[in-house]
Image (tube, rainbow, N blue to C red):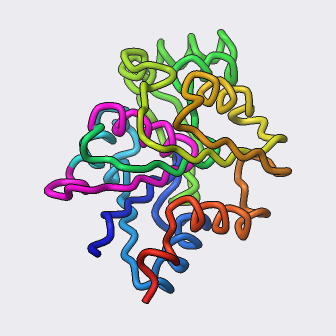
Amino acid sequence: MTPPRYIYLHGFASSPSSRKAQFFRQHFEQLGLDLRIPQLDEGDFTSLTVGAQLKVIERQAQDAPDVVLLGSSLGGYLSALYAARHPDQVSKLVLLAPAFGFPGRWREAMGDERMRKWKEQGSVNMFHYGSNAMRPISYRLIEEAASYEDYPEVSQPTLILHGTADDVVPPRYAEEFARRHPDSTKLVLLDSGHELTDVQDKLWNETQSFLQLSMEFQS
């Protein structure tokens, strides 16, 4: 049996070299499986938009009849957006602390005054974990993201792994998604924060079981 095309989508201001991305890549490699991990900003963090990242995913998934998406934080939200728009191509989702409600939570996190200055100045400096440096990002991200839904209409089987102590994307967002999609979503709450790096073995065990990796594809 030919395995699906597995694609991992990293979080905001992150990169393919993130700890979780490499953790999953190593475990997929141990099963003889390829895990694609694209750089979602393609080296242009300043001009980052949701739509541009969806195009990156589309190119990675091109010509694949069966795609499984794994996504962390913003990457999880992007996975759900893409899956909702490609129900016949994407078969399963694994979402790690997915950033549902992405556009609106910026104001919640930054406050009205900082958001106003960001809009007036056109860009603001943020720490980019992938490059370990402050880098500017355009307010266009917020304006363009507002056109996307908070909770994509995903019909595919979906596993959500979320930390109960997540103060970046509170678990209530994952709980709301699961409430809206009760027949297709398995929500696992873990004793961890947003990064989930202290429960990586649990992440893998849940993912491996959900995707049936060892049973179907391990030689």
| 134 relative to 168, above or below | below
Point 71% across, 66% down: residue: 200
**Percent from the top left, x then y, of residue 12?**
52, 44
Question: Which residues are drawn in magenta?
Answer: 59-86
Residue 49: say if magenta.
no
Q: Which of 95 and 123 is in front in this view?
A: 95
Point 51% across, 67% down: residue: 212
User: In this view, which residue lies farthest toward the bottom?
Assistant: 219
Q: In what quadrant of the picture does the N terminus appear? A: bottom left
**Percent from the top left, x then y, of residue 147?**
36, 15
Point 58% across, 47% down: residue: 159
**Percent from the top left, x then y, of residue 84?**
35, 32
Q: In what quadrant of the picture does the C terminus appear? A: bottom left
Point 59% across, 27% down: residue: 177
Q: Which of 192 and 45 is in front in this view?
A: 192
Among the 4 quarters of the image, the one containing residue 87: top left
Among the 4 quarters of the image, the one containing residue 107: top right
Q: How many marks?
A: 0
Q: In this view, does 135 lie to the left or right of 193?
A: left
Q: Nearer the viewer, residue 138 or 191?
A: 191
Q: In this view, does 144 lie to the left or right of 137?
A: left
Residue 76: say if magenta.
yes
Q: Nearer the viewer, residue 133 or 210?
A: 210
**Percent from the top left, x then y, of residue 24?**
54, 70
| 44 relative to 21, above or below | above
User: In this view, which residue lies farthest toward the left?
Assistant: 63
